[in-house]
Image (tube, grey):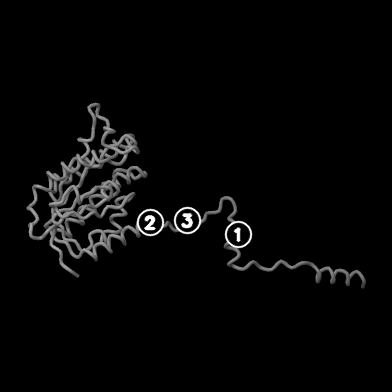
Amino acid sequence: MNRMLNRLLALLLAPVMPAMPAWAAELVPAAAGDQLAPAPAANASLRFAPEIAAFQRHDKDLGIVNGGTLFVGSSSIRRWDVAAGFPAFAPVNHGFGGSETPDVLYYYPQILSVYRPAAVVVYIGENDIAHGAAPERVIADVLTLLTRLRSDLPQARIVFLSLKPGNARWGLWAKMQQVNAAVKAQAEAAGDFDYLDVGTALLAADGRPDDRYFLEDRIHLNADGYAVWNLLVDAYLEMMPPVPTQIAGGERVAH
């Protein structure tokens, strides 16, 4: 009798392990070899939202501009004082630093915004290569952007500025040249946009990038480098019909 009572007491007093709720099971680390579902990738383009919002505020204040020149792309565009370089062509700068071609495509409606420019100047793709994108991927993305611009702006001149060399990224130059060659070939074959070589003029006699045209980072242009680009792009824009002087920098239509 005593033995049976002792066994019963032992069972009643033994600690009970409750079943683990489903929410708690999710917090338990997976055992080695278990396959975890990958976390959803963050949209890297969202980091540019403040700059895009600034474009939109500026565009709203300015009003619709017809007949000007829209500059689109990464920091090589953003750092460019296009207002001083091209006063006769009503320039609008919609470059945002660090951007890659997918970022420009993501924000395409906000970048084009209310503008109906006479010309669009595009510099994009260098960061793509620098951050590991394959040339084939960059070519496809760039051509997607240029095709979309042509579709939405059938009367505009559209020019792609060639990816530039720089000593800090010289090891990537062969990949950038692949992009340049493919975009140039498409421009010549289809005639939907133009290709402008803005890199050769930045080379020294030995065929390497001339540091006189670059900031200390050996990536971005300095004032002398932009002076070279001003001459090249101005010569291209001069081939367009002039913006009427009475428009005073582009036709503005209030919202």
Say if 199 sits above or below 40 in the image: above
The answer for how far apart the CA atoms under marks 3 and 2 are is: 22 Å
- Labels 2 and 1 touching (C-beta < 8 A): no
**Residue carrying label 2:** 47
Q: Earlier in the sequence, mark 2 or mark 1?
A: 1
Can you tell which mark lies on residue 28? 1
SS label for mark 2: helix
Say if 173 sits above or below 109 in the image: above
Q: Which class describes the residues within 10 Å of circle 3: few (<14), some (14-19), or many (20+)? A: few
SS label for mark 3: loop
Q: Which class describes the residues within 10 Å of circle 1: few (<14), some (14-19), or many (20+)? A: few
- Residue that appears at 62% across and 68% down: 21
Say if 46 sits above or below 206 in the image: below
Residue 93 located left or right of residue 49: left
The three-letter code of the residue at mark 3 reads Pro
Q: Earlier in the sequence, mark 3 or mark 2?
A: 3
Considering every residue shown, the one lying at the far right of the view is 2
- Residue that appears at 60% across and 63% down: 25
Residue 2 in percent (x, y) is at 92, 71
**Residue carrying label 3:** 38
Tell me the quarter of the image containing the N terminus.
bottom right
Residue 177 located left or right of residue 195: right
- Residue that appears at 52% across and 56% down: 36
Q: Can you tell which quarter of the image residue 234 is in?
A: top left
Q: Nearer the viewer, residue 147 or 20?
A: 147
Residue 49 in percent (x, y) is at 35, 59
The three-letter code of the residue at mark 2 reads Arg
